[in-house]
Image (tube, rainbow, N blue to C red):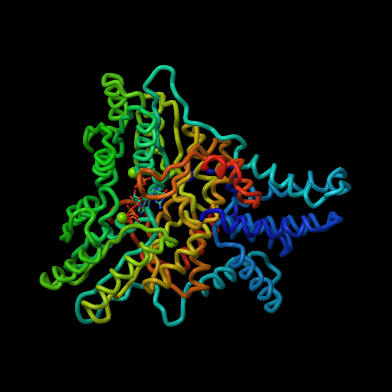
Amino acid sequence: SKTSTSFVGAISDLFSGRSKIDEELFEELEEILISADVGVTTTMELVERLRQEVKERKIKEPSELQPLLSEIISDMLELEGKSNQLQMNPDGMTVILFVGVNGVGKTTTIGKLAHRFKNEGKKVVLAAGDTFRAGAIEQLEVWGQRVGVDVIKHQAGADPAAVIYDGIQAAKSRKADVLLCDTAGRLQNKVNLMEELKKVHRVIQREIPDAPHEVLLVLDATTGQNAMMQAKTFGEAVNVSGIVLTKLDGTAKGGIVIAISNELQVPVKLVGLGEKPDDLQEFDPAQFVHALFKD
Amino acid sequence: MAFEGLAERLQAVMQRLRGKGKVTEADVKEAMREVRLALLEADVNFKVVKTFINRVKERAVGQEVLKSLTPGQQVIKVVNEELTELMGGEQSKLVKSNRPPTVIMMVGLQGAGKTTTSGKLARYLSKQNHHPLLVAADVYRPAAIRQLQVLGEQLDTPVFSLGEKEDPVKIAEQGVAYAKEHHHDYVIIDTAGRLHIDETMMEELKAIREKVQPDEVLLVVDAMTGQDAVNVAESFNKKLGLTGVVLTKLDGDTRGGAALSVKAVTNCPIKFVGMGEKTDALEPFFPDRMASRILGMGDVLTLIEKA
Ligand SMILES: Nc1nc2c(ncn2[C@@H]2O[C@H](COP(=O)(O)OP(=O)(O)OP(=O)(O)O)[C@@H](O)[C@H]2O)c(=O)[nH]1
Ligand SMILES: Nc1nc2c(ncn2[C@@H]2O[C@H](COP(=O)(O)OP(=O)(O)OP(=O)(O)O)[C@@H](O)[C@H]2O)c(=O)[nH]1
Ligand SMILES: [Mg+2]
Ligand SMILES: [Mg+2]
């Protein structure tokens, strides 16, 4: 159960508890979207679109607004020609590279995803590409043991690209179905660290044609507007193909992914809902929108 | 650099005001509309923004201000004062107990930077000839103890651990006892990350707090946090009674509005900021300087200190 604080107003009755569609309602809606981290620009765009629809469809009842808004937001989240599901290699090994800023949940998501693939009967190998953070290799190893998959590692301080290279060779020789590559967290404004990441990406591309099949940017749902910068910069560096939105089990709504989807055309693919192996789900736009308006 | 984007936006608004000979109520309103957007885009919580804007408006459209010789500058002064107030006024130092050891407890959401900051604080204190002890009370996160031990090795600081099979409350209690016995004058307790709405896990922190009576309970907050920062800070504060905040990852390009929000709801001072992943990347926080920097008054004091 969620504790209610003075900063969280009841918003579920915004649409149902009203008799008419007026300025006040639109203003309140704006606040809800802003407080969900949707961001000023996208909020304005959403509310503007809603106003237009209301006019065009001659809508009078506030209760008709919620489905309409859900439709508009879902529209932004479901991208033409881009699936909200993971793209697996149809003939051969699937390589997935995980990237993102510090502490968002990359390593944990790899553990959860390994668990899921394993349950589907796939052979999974993990590559410990974070050689920088204290205890990062051991953390991935614990996940490897927990879900019963192999972890390829070097020593702390080793070249991440070399670890990934070895990971690829090991995964190939073990005939793995999936290789999940961990990388160290890095802030997108650190130029040298972004270069290091590009090198890792290049090694994968060089070793396996068409790989990586997914480059997943992990975003923490509690992150605010900076997530847009993260998506832009990581996108430019390593061609991000999808987003994993973690920590949605908290009270943060992760609304910034609407802006990211809309502006950068990167689909959300997975959501993290806790710290346990099973706490990973496919992204469901409708459910996400529903949660936006839930207290 | 963090805060930069916010600084640019606000300075542009202020620049326009500064140039005006006459300032009307409409000018102030227009300026405040822009300030509002700048703050929201910097992730300052929308309720905090509302209060802030109302206070500035109230003071700025007062007779004395608009009729003064330099109305534009008077408005800027009001904004600066209110912003400094929002950031917490004076610098606030780490508390020191007169009955050592001083006990510091680190708390916060998952991945905020507690363990790293624990290491940084140990280094910061060692540099001042103190003898800190690190206590590994995170028994949940895979290899959390190992992470702290690696940091301890790097810093030559002992790490107290009972492994991951023990109760964190017991670990904290015995850690403090160990520190007393071995003449450590500071104890830094690293706890597991948790959600503020996780009742069981929050109870655990409360139990640790009651058992070891820490001198500092520091909430570690990621500077990139969005609107939810207020809920997190408010819950931790209500449950535990925080004594301070550490803002991490300020070496990024976040506009850092969470800093303002957290201060506003907890009224707890931001004591340190994290400026990188390495253990030397910790700095004391100066609210007044930060406010001036955001408004482009020049971070003169910091420059003087560095020279
Ligand atoms: N509540 C919750 N916690 C999560 C979730 N995903 C990850 N975490 C926690 O967040 C913290 C950081 O997760 P990591 O997987 O270490 O993050 P990372 O991105 O690999 O971090 P770095 O490698 O240090 O950059 C850990 O305490 C995880 O247990 C989630 O979906 N929900
Ligand atoms: N760039 C940067 N990274 C930081 C800073 N502080 C911590 N980090 C990184 O953030 C990530 C998470 O830090 P941790 O210290 O493991 O966070 P935590 O709060 O102990 O995480 P949990 O124990 O899982 O809740 C790591 O990759 C750290 O290196 C900082 O000031 N700047
Ligand atoms: Mg990691
Ligand atoms: Mg930790």
- Residue B16 seen: yes
Figure check: A142 above or below A41: above
Identify the residue shown where x is 64% and y is 73%.
A49
> Quarter-wise, where is residue B36 in the image?
bottom right
Q: Position of residue A164 (x, y in %)?
A: 22, 66
> Quarter-wise, where is residue A128 in the image?
bottom left
Identify the residue shown where x is 42% and y is 82%.
A81
Residue farthest along the left direction in this orientation:
A173
> Quarter-wise, where is residue A268 in the image?
bottom left
Residue farthest along the front direction in this orientation:
B307
Image side of residue A230 versus residue B184, left or right: right
Q: Quadrant of ligand 3?
A: bottom left
Image side of residue B237 versus residue B79, left or right: left
Figure check: B179 above or below B262: above
Q: Position of residue B23 (x, y in %)?
A: 84, 55
Residue farthest along the top direction in this orientation:
B99
- Residue A118 seen: no
Using the image as rendered, state which of residue A17 and residue A126 is in the foreground.
A126
Q: How many marks?
A: 0
Identify the residue shown where x is 79% and y is 44%.
B59
Using the image as rendered, state which of residue A132 and residue A269 is in the foreground.
A132
Instruction: Work out which quarter of the rendered image holds the N terminus of chain A and state it.
Output: top left
Q: Position of residue B194 (x, y in %)?
A: 39, 44
Q: Position of residue B202 (x, y in %)?
A: 41, 37
